């Protein structure tokens, strides 16, 4: 699932995820002048059964239009709707911090040429329903 096209698309996405588990993947690419590494982090998210009123309230009162899957786990919908998370909470927000930090730490400490470290992190959040 990408970002919703409009209000109705956001409503449909949340209805589809209600009572189901989905996977969130965040892709990261770290590039320097001398090397490039890419990886993806994966997290499973289980939504409770959401009522039509809860879904409509969230879409109308929050900003789901700029979020893949039409939700932000750190927002109201995450507090009332997410039953279980298997993996990184930050990955659901599109931030694979732990994996990126570990990769950078290893690379910097193993490299004698770390002075030219110009880091660019690109991220994309992709959601797949199971």
Image (cartoon, rainbow, N blue to C red):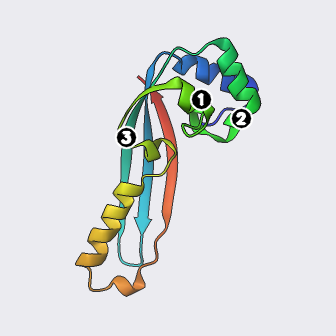
Q: What is the number of the mark on residue 77?
A: 1
Q: Is residue 112 left or right of residue 30?
A: left
Residue at the image position 55 percent from the left and 18 percent from the top: 16
To which residue does mark 3 refer? 42
**The image quarter in which residue 29 lies:** bottom left
Can residue 56 be seen?
A: yes
Look at the picture and state if 83 lies above or below 72.
above
Q: Residues within 10 Å of mark 2 (few under 14, many from 20)?
A: some
Sooner in the amino-acid sequence: mark 2 or mark 1: 2
Q: Quadrant of the C terminus?
A: top left
Callout 2–callout 1 Cβ contact below 8 Å: yes
Looking at the picture, how far across and down is residue 98, in whole percent?
Answer: 36, 56
C-alpha separation, residue under disc 3 versus residue under disc 1: 20 Å
Comparing 63 with 84, the one in front is 84
* Circle 3: element type: strand
Looking at the picture, how far across and down is residue 81, in whole percent?
Answer: 54, 24
Residue farthest left in this picture:
110
């Amino acid at each position: 699932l990408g970002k919703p096209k409009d209000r109705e698309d956001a409503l449909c996405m949340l209805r589809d995820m209600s009572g189901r588990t989905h996977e969130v993947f965040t892709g990261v690419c770290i590039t320097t002048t001398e090397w490039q590494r890419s990886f993806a982090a994966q997290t499973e998210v289980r939504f409770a059964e959401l009522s039509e009123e809860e879904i409509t309230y969230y879409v109308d009162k929050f900003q789901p239009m700029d979020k893949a899957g039409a939700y932000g786990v750190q927002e109201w919908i995450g507090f009332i709707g997410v039953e279980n998370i298997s993996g990184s909470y930050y990955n659901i927000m599109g931030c694979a911090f732990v994996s990126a930090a570990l990769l950078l730490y290893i690379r910097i400490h193993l490299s004698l040429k770390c002075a030219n470290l110009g880091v660019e992190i690109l991220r994309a959040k992709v959601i797949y329903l199971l």
